[in-house]
Amino acid sequence: MQITIRNFSINDFEGVNVLMNQVHKLHMDSRPDFYRNTNEPISEKDFFSIVNNDNIISILAEIKILL
């Protein structure tokens, strides 16, 4: 297994969006009084803004299984 830590890229939106939806559902299930239902926890526009902002740390771990 190889783990690479790297900065987000614009191409990561789809994968990050899946994860954001899962995390948001967990939050909603735990605190429905605080979190509202939404189909878009982070918009593509907001994601691109984060990726292009040098003042925001946006990293991910990319895991590759080596056979």
Image (cartoon, helix red, strand yellow):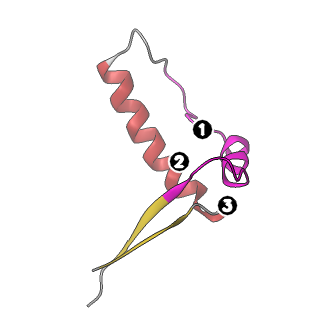
Q: Quadrant of the N terminus?
A: bottom left
- Residue to which mark 3 is pinned: 10
The main secondary structure of the magenta stretch is loop
Tell me: 49 left or right of 57.
right
* The disc label shown at residue 29, or none: none
First along the sequence among labels 2 and 1? 2
Position above or below: 66 against 8: below
> Residue flagged by tag 1: what amino acid is it?
Ile
Residue 40 appears left or right of 50: left
Figure quadrant of residue 9: bottom right
- Residue name at image x 47 percent, y 49 percent: 18
Q: Residue at x 55, y 34 (%)?
A: 41
Which residue is label 2 attached to? 17
Q: Are marks 2 and 1 in contact (CB under 8 Å)?
A: yes
Q: Position of residue 38 (x, y in %)?
A: 54, 26
Q: Which residues are magenta?
A: 37-59
Q: Secondary structure at mark 3?
A: helix
Callout in the foreground (3, 2): 3
Rendered location of residue 26, percent (x, y): 33, 31
Q: List the residue tagged with mark 1.
A: 42
**Residue occupying image coordinates x 55% and y 32%:** 39
Instruction: Quadrant for the C terminus, please.
Output: bottom left
Expressed as whole percent of the image width and height from the top left, the position of residue 34 reads 43, 12
- Looking at the rendered structure, the kind of residue marked 3 is Ile
How would you rate the neighbour count of disc 3 (Cα within 10 Å): few for under 14, some for 14-19, many for 20 or more?
Answer: some
Residue 65, horizontal then vertical, whole percent:
30, 80
Whole-angstrom CA distance, mark 3 to mark 2, is: 12 Å
Q: For numbered disc 1, what is the local secondary structure?
A: loop
Q: Amino acid at mark 2?
A: Asn
